[in-house]
Amino acid sequence: MLEKEFLERFSQITLKMGVNLQKDQGLLIVCPVEKHHVAEALCETAYKMGAGTVTVRWECESIERLNYLHDSQRYLTQVPQWVVKSREYLLQENFCYVAISAEDPNCFNGVPADRINKAVQARSKALKKFSDKVMANAIRWCVVSVPTLNWAKTVFPNSPSPQEDLLDAIAKTMRLDSENPLLEWEKHVDNLQRRSNILNDCNFSYLHFTSNNGTDLKVGLADGHNWLSAKEKAQDGLEFIANLPTEEIFTAPHRLRVDGKVYSAKPLVYNGSVIDNFCLTFKDGKVTDFNAERGYQTLKELLDTDQGVLRLGEVALIGKNSPIAQSGILFYNTLFDENASCHLAFGKGYPTTINNSDKMTRQQLKEAGLNDSIEHVDFMIGTCDLKVVGVNKDGSQTTLFLDGDWVI
Ligand code: ZN
Ligand code: ZN
């Protein structure tokens, strides 16, 4: 696909289906500096749609890398008040917010993991109020991707034109190559909604995951859990889609009721390092043992973040025939890879995955089984032979997945 055509369609889908930008509303775009023209295209489309104002926050990994390497101890973990205030401003003004995720998976290679983790944790702590509100849909937000050079080279190491190849792959997964992408999205969203309605009607006690790689895990679901898919409602009542592309149907595991062993199905990129071929043992909801063939130290650092990160905050179901899974491409980017495979997430759960959560206190959410942490990190478990069975309180069973795909 030509980049010009891509950007037109990409901007339309992101602003209409993604954040559902309204007349006179403010928009923040978080964009890598090397993709200046993408921010410009989004900005133009936003103003055509009647945006009140558009602000861009530029990100640059090579500078960030230098910060991680050389910041003094004091500055490494200091989050300036103006950063916290800038997030509060977004909430006050009900901005919507588009984040472009296009990290080079190797950008922080060679940076000591403990320095990155200290800095990331300090930022997560300082911005926890904001991320809590975002996760409770206080504003409409959307994560999308465009190819950056180093990322594209990692995904297509042997290609003479990796950025073009990645652009085509993203266009396919975002359904931008169809005749009418908006219509395709409407259809896709309806289909996801149909399945999440079925799961909500079933109201399972737990899901049982089994696979030939050794996975045998029972994931209890939180009391009053609510299965969500693409379209969510923000607190102002308007709908939005938080991830584009999205293929998942997800809900809240019960923080105390996860038992068994689970093996990863794809590598996990965390803070610029790859963790691969890892397994976790759970007892009463908590990781009690873990191992990793690659990135053990990074996994250990992640699991040391706080107590909540040892428990699960999300369980998500995605069939192996989704366009992303079908592409067979390992994107080294969670936005895509999590949508290619059933996954779980370490850490914080989404309050929106509990019914009536807006009327519940933190303590009530915890009692219902919703997990809390400063982290939320997805990891993929969906092998092509995965079986998933939903089990009700009375022991009755419904098979949801056979050989890695939906049977309902
Ligand atoms: Zn997910
Ligand atoms: Zn997640």
Image (cartoon, rainbow, N blue to C red):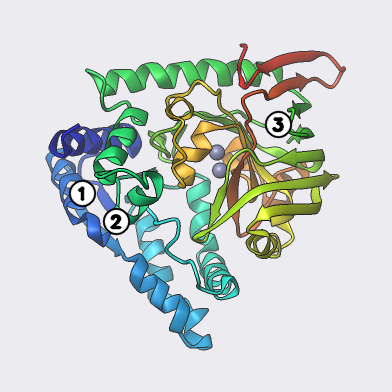
Instruction: Tell me which amino acid carries mark 2.
Output: Cys
Task: Confirm or deny contact between disc 2 and disc 1 (CB under 8 A).
Answer: yes
Tell whether circle 1 marks a residue whose Cβ is less than 8 angstroms from ligand 2.
Answer: no
Q: Secondary structure at mark 2?
A: strand
Q: Which mark is on residue 74? A: none
Alpha-carbon span between mark 3 and mark 1: 41 Å
Q: Quadrant of ligand 1?
A: top right
Q: Where is mark 2, residue-wise?
A: 31
Q: Earlier in the sequence, mark 2 or mark 3?
A: 2
Frontmost residue, 42 versus 275: 275
Q: Secondary structure at mark 3?
A: loop
Q: Hey, which quadrant is residue 6 in on the image?
A: top left
Q: Earlier in the sequence, mark 2 or mark 1?
A: 2
Image side of residue 220 versus residue 100, left or right: right
At x 15%, y 35%, the residue is 2
At x 77%, y 53%, the residue is 290
Residue 274: percent from left, percent from top: 55, 55
Task: Confirm or deny contact between disc 2 and disc 3 (CB under 8 A).
Answer: no
Instruction: Tell me which amino acid carries mark 1.
Output: Val
Q: Nearer the viewer, mark 3 or mark 1?
A: 1
Residue 402 seen in the figure: yes
Tell whether circle 2 marks a residue whose Cβ is less than 8 angstroms from ligand 2.
Answer: no
Instruction: Tell me which amino acid carries mark 3.
Output: Gly
Q: Where is mark 1, residue-wise?
A: 38
Q: Hey, which quadrant is residue 20 in on the image?
A: top left
Q: Where is mark 3, residue-wise?
A: 224
Tell whether circle 3 marks a residue whose Cβ is less than 8 angstroms from ligand 1.
Answer: no
Image side of residue 241 versus residue 162, left or right: right
Frontmost residue, 59 versus 215: 215
When the figure is inspected, residue 105 is found, relative to residue 189, above or below; the finding is below
Image side of residue 75 versus residue 99, left or right: right
- In which quadrant will I find the N terminus? top left
